[in-house]
Amino acid sequence: MAITASHQRFLQVLMSHGIMEGSAVRKLHRHCCEVHKAHYMPDKLDDFVAVINNHLQPLFMQIRKGTDENDGKRYYSLVNVAESDVTKMAMDYAENELELFRKTMDLIIDSDNGFASSTNILNLTDQLQTKKMKKKEVEQLLQSFVQEKWLIEKDGEYSLHTRCIMEMEHYIQSTYQDVVKTCNICHNIAIQGQICDNCGIKIHLTCVGKYFKGQEEPRCPQCAEAWSHEIPRLLQTDSQTPSTSQRNTRAGERRVNSVAAATRSRRS
Ligand SMILES: [Zn+2]
Ligand SMILES: [Zn+2]
């Protein structure tokens, strides 16, 4: 299928955001088709994206879909597939800044909960081989990593941004293959999550929330020991497109219904 003005507009907007939530992407899809008088098929977003991806391939770029570890929502991101590791950030950061990012990534991935404290990151400055950094510079650099959606910050602790996980999935899997865990429920990389004290499996917070919802005595899906962590309350994810694994759940059904209702109300 040929690329049209509606595809171009879609790509431009996604590019300017870097990463966008699924419901915003669906709205954008509709908007681009309407503005350019293209035939709009709400359930053909994946095909629409595939047309763009075909044209992006020679440029080593790709639009990828992923799930956020915090809110469990779908996200779309434009990623650079030429470089799978931290060197894709080389345009924007100096060598010692990249070194600090790599070391921060080590801390985050080595931790149980997927977070590194700012104190621990600041302590890295003395270990830099390339060029030492002042604490102030590190603080500014961390801010920039958050702004550019490589890291997220929560109460002075840092984790990897969804965009970063989507862009560097292969790198994370190969570099940290002995350390990084996949979620026992959704089988995606799990950076932020809870670990079973008994058997050591890891589950995303959002997957924990969904899996143990309504259970009085939650037990590990792997070893059946009592789950010792607090079960996080689920955020509202009603705007989410149901994935195959959720279709059998009641929450999934609710989502299908709400999407169907939203589609109906858009038409009327
Ligand atoms: Zn999961
Ligand atoms: Zn277990």
Image: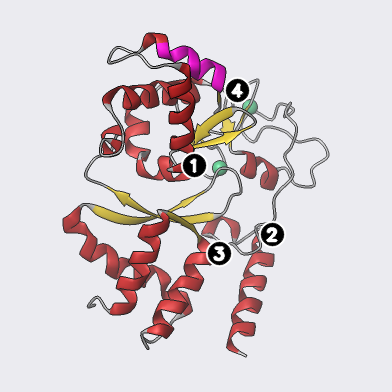
Label 2 neighbour load within 10 Å: few <14, some 14-19, many 20+: some
Q: Residue 156 in the image: x percent, y percent?
A: 61, 27
The first of marks 2 and 1 along the sequence is 1
Label 1 neighbour load within 10 Å: few <14, some 14-19, many 20+: few
Estimate the spatial distance between the alpha carbons at disc 2 and disc 1, rounded to whole Å. 19 Å
Amino acid type, callout 1 = His
**Residue at the (72%, 29%) spot, across then down:** 229
The first of marks 2 and 4 along the sequence is 4
Q: Is residue 176 visible?
A: no
The quadrant of the image that shows the N terminus is bottom left
Residue 187: mark: 1
From this view, report whether residue 138 is shown above or below residue 30. Answer: above
| Tag in front: 2 or 4 | 2
Do the residues bearing badges 2 and 3 touch, measured as CB atoms within 8 Å? no
Bounds of the magenta segment: 118-125
Q: Residue 135 in the image: x percent, y percent?
A: 47, 17
From this view, report whether residue 208 is shown above or below residue 36. Answer: above
Estimate the spatial distance between the alpha carbons at disc 2 and disc 4, rounded to whole Å. 28 Å
Q: Residue 60 in the image: x percent, y percent?
A: 21, 52
Mark 1 Cβ and ligand 1 under 8 Å apart: yes
- Residue that carries the numbered disc 4 in the rendered image: 199
Q: Residue 264 versus residue 216: which sits nearer the camera? A: 264
From this view, report whether residue 134 is shown above or below residue 246. Answer: above
- Residue that carries the numbered disc 3 in the rendered image: 241
Mark 4 Cβ and ligand 2 under 8 Å apart: yes
